[in-house]
């Protein structure tokens, strides 16, 4: 059993212990499970969808096209990958980026001779740091909209500069830590691959249709869990017809679901017994948004996200922000979105990303992952909050 599996089961066991001993009342635990049921359905369905779409070779085809357009130039390929990841995150949300784009990047690594980690890290970092501009970019943004009292246009109007700064800082550190020569592997130039035929054209066309329907459902603002479920059901039916050998129990991401359930049992218990008070104390001494308040709230959000996950972190800190603290709420979003790249559990997108890397055998050196993520958070969050204050 891996270290992450031990953490998952340990967290679930601790949460169940809290419920069994009454530290977390059963009614409150049940309320938390009802709240995250749509998230659990989405996670399970979207991973099955992405896994089967990958088996249909859709991601291989997209990866080949990107490599061809790059024409053997690593800088051009880097710009294409970062632009693609940023746009998908902004308009389709960060979880979609991780689920649909990580397999593309891993397939691209195989076709260009670049190490898998630089391409995978491009997806992960930009899935988190490019999720500021629109309410749909991140679930925490949607949670904040009611308190902010802003339209989507007003939201984007305040965050366009912080978003640009966040993406720019991310690109700089992606290049320095992972993409520059000597880090990415391979030769000075890569050989653009020659597109080839897919193994099963019928499955390929169905995969294209499933992804198109999934994206269309998101754009139409249908419940994301039903969009993912519909796509997964279509792909399961297609493989039951064309290739049943791919339909195995390994498709079901039980490890991820175990972790999320445990997380949403442990965090409410900690909030009942002191965590909420600690957050109120930290935010209460932060001063106004024009002073060090925004920086402190963002830092609290980033640190707490990497300790307990950004969704419960946002919820806990949000309650500690006084009424009318719009800039503090926006700073909190920066901290919980752009700051959730240090630990494997910092965001649901990061969890999904690690699940994909585990399934595809991509080795992620944990010390390097944490250290580079910490550098990005310190510089990126600080620069992004500064840009936010400039737009006041």
Image: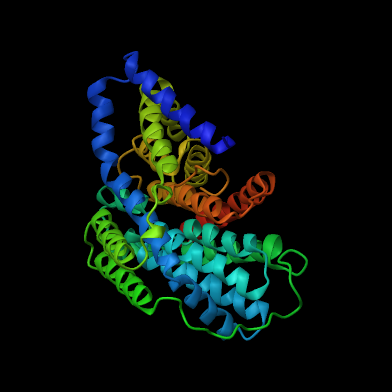
Report the residue at 23% width, 56% height from top: 226
Instruction: Please say whether residue 132 is visible from this viewpoint.
Output: no
Relative image position of residue 296 (x, y in whole percent): 51, 41
Quarter where residue 268 is shown: top left
Relative image position of residue 114 (x, y in whole percent): 67, 69
Report the residue at 47% width, 62% height from top: 130
Q: Is residue 168 left or right of residue 17?
A: right
Quarter where residue 28 is shown: top left
Report the residue at 67% width, 77% height from top: 74
As rendered, which of 182 and 242 lies closer to the eye? Answer: 242
Q: Is residue 102 left or right of residue 324?
A: right
47 lies above or below 88? above
State the count of labels: 0
The N terminus, quarter of image:
top right
299 lies above or below 167? above
Residue that sits furthest to the top in the current view: 21
Quarter where residue 266 is shown: top left
299 lies above or below 265? below
Relative image position of residue 134 (x, y in whole percent): 35, 63
Instruction: Please say whether residue 157 is visible from this viewpoint.
Output: yes
Relative image position of residue 23 (x, y in whole percent): 34, 16
């Amino acid at each position: 059993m891996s270290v992450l599996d031990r953490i998952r089961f340990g967290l679930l066991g601790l949460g169940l212990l809290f419920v069994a001993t009454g530290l977390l009342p059963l009614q409150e635990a049940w309320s938390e499970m009802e709240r995250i049921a749509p998230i659990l359905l989405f996670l399970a369905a979207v991973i099955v969808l992405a896994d089967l779409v990958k088996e249909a070779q859709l991601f291989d085809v997209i990866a080949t096209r990107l490599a061809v357009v790059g024409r053997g130039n690593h800088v051009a390929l880097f710009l294409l990958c970062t632009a693609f990841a940023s746009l998908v995150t902004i308009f389709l949300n960060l979880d979609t980026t991780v689920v649909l784009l990580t397999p593309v990047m891993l397939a691209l690594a195989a076709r260009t001779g670049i190490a898998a980690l630089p391409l995978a890290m491009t997806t992960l970092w930009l899935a988190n740091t490019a999720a500021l501009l629109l309410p749909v970019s991140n679930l925490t943004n949607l949670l904040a909209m009611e308190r902010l009292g802003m339209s989507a246009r007003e939201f984007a109007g305040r965050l366009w500069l912080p978003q640009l700064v966040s993406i720019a800082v991310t690109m700089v550190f992606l290049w320095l830590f992972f993409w520059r020569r000597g880090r990415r592997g391979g030769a000075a130039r890569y050989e653009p691959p020659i597109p080839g035929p897919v193994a099963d054209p019928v499955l390929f066309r169905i995969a294209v249709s499933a992804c198109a329907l999934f994206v269309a459902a998101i754009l139409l603002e249908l419940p994301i869990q039903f969009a993912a479920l519909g796509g997964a059901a279509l792909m399961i039916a297609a493989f039951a017809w064309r290739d049943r050998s791919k339909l195995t129990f390994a498709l079901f991401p039980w490890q991820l679901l175990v972790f999320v359930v445990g997380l949403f049992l442990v965090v409410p218990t900690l909030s009942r017994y002191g965590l909420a008070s600690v957050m109120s104390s930290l935010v209460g001494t932060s001063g106004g948004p024009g002073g060090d308040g925004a920086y402190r709230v963002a830092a609290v959000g980033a640190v707490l996200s990497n300790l307990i996950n950004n969704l419960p972190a946002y919820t806990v800190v949000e309650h500690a922000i006084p009424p009318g603290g719009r800039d503090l709420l926006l700073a909190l979003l920066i901290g919980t979105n752009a700051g959730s790249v240090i630990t494997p559990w910092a965001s649901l997108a990061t969890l999904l990303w690690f699940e994909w890397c585990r399934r595809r055998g991509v080795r992620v050196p944990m010390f390097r992952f944490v250290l580079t993520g910490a550098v990005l958070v310190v510089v990126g969050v600080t620069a992004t909050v500064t840009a936010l204050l400039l737009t006041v």
